[in-house]
Image (cartoon, rainbow, N blue to C red):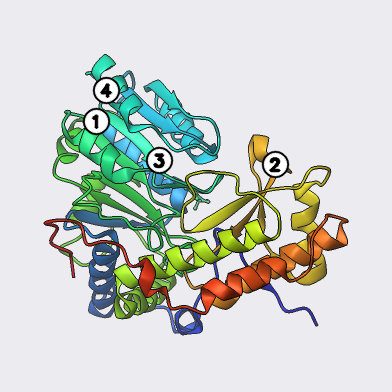
Amino acid sequence: MKKHYLITPGPTPIPPEVSSKEGLPVLHHRTSEFGVYFVEVIEGLKYVFQTRNDLFLITSSGTGGMESAVANLISAGDTAIVAASGAFGERWGKILASYGAQVVWVREPDGQAIVPSKIEEALKKNPQAKAVFGQHTETSTGVVNDVQKLGEIVSKTPAVFVLDAISGLGGQELRTDDWKADVVVAGSQKGLMTAPGLAMVSVSRKAWPLVEAAKSPRFYFDYRTLRKSIPEKETPYTPAVTLIVSMAEALRQIKDEGIENVWARHAWLAHATREGVKAMGLTIFTQTPCNVLTSINVPAGLDGKKIVKRTREEYGVSIAGGQVQLEGKIVRLAHMGYMGRFDVIIGLSALEMMLHDMGAKIELGKGVAAAQRHLQNPPAAFAPAPAPGAAAIR
Ligand SMILES: Cc1ncc(COP(=O)(O)O)c(C=O)c1O
């Protein structure tokens, strides 16, 4: 028997109460019964996003949500600023290029956060820019960006701020409205504790004139069509009904815990993971780590790809490796969504054992013990400071 553990930054484990909803008889999507779920999910997502903006559900993975933002905001020839420091930042640029946008790159090396003053500069040099595209948490490197600062900078210009919060939402603090993020994209399979297959996008008032004016071809992803069907409590086309019904349960659980407590729990798990990694004698890949995953430098002489493969095959523990140029060089442990203190222990313990198996100078139990010391305390100490003057969305 091999028990399997999913310690990857998406897909993530799903609470049994959520996955059991996937087994219910499929509802028809043009019924009042479905309408009740639809409204509950939209309202629940607005709470997790902390937004009063329009919010749409799209049946696609997160990348579909990203493409929808580009198709609805950008016309061929428009200038768009991309703040990138990893694989998902690069993805914004690739999507934009395929829609014929003039991309102005503001790149930082992998593992570094976006420098807000460079975005300010890019906006000054490119006053015609329609939008700034960036990541909340860059999953490929484990970095968190200063979204609040970036939002403040972009809000002072005519450009809109488009944020990929696919891995950050529901784990890392995000206050969409207070932090002036105009278009925010998320996905079901990460902090939202639901199976893969749904994207969601919030759209601010500032962004709507761009949506109305954009000339890019769009049909399935057209926000105007999606907006029209909201009062009908449905989506324009057949949605992933099963995922919506199960997500309603996941959102109930998030609401019961309270979004600030969810953020605090993630900060607590992230802290314990980092302390465990350091106690093992390893180093964290970034100086600006996010709270939803930890990226760890692979010890010299070892291959990260083999670590990931063997950890899964021999111990039944799935962790993530590095992507693109980081392949083999880092491994990533998730603490995202339906995860608690013993998920951290499993991830660290599996890594510790595998590195030991592979001949690294690792003393078994050291990382686990360090994490245990932090995990004995409750997460309350990690509660985020209330945003000054902010009216939290309940
Ligand atoms: C930050 C970020 N952006 C985009 C994506 C792509 O999402 P999907 O694989 O659901 O299309 C991911 C998925 O890992 C992600 O973490």
For mark 3, does the 10 Å Cα neighbourhood hold few (<14), some (14 to 19), or many (20 or more) residues?
many
Q: Position of residue 147 (x, y in %)?
A: 32, 44
Q: Which residue is mark 3?
A: 67
* Mark 2 vs 1, N-terminal side: 1
* Mark 3 vs 1, N-terminal side: 3
Q: Which residue is mark 1?
A: 214
Label 1: which secondary element = loop
Is 174 drawn above or below residue 344 in the view shown?
above
Is 358 drawn above or below residue 382 in the view shown?
above
Q: Which residue is mark 2?
A: 327
* 199 horizontally vs 371: left or right: left
Label 3: which secondary element = helix
* Mark 3 vs 4, N-terminal side: 3
Residue situated in front as seen by the camera: 2 or 264: 264
Label 2: which secondary element = loop
Residue situated in front as seen by the camera: 164 or 268: 268
Residue drawn at (44%, 54%) of the image: 60
Q: Which residue is mark 4?
A: 123
At label 4, the amino acid type is: Leu
Q: Split into 4 quadrants, where in the image is the N terminus?
A: bottom right
At label 3, the amino acid type is: Glu
* Mark 1 vs 4, N-terminal side: 4
For mark 1, does the 10 Å Cα neighbourhood hold few (<14), some (14 to 19), or many (20 or more) residues?
some
Separation (CA) of disc 2 from disc 4? 33 Å
Q: Is residue 252 visible?
A: yes
Residue drawn at (23%, 60%) of the image: 50
Residue 127, image quadrant: top left
Separation (CA) of disc 3 from disc 4? 22 Å
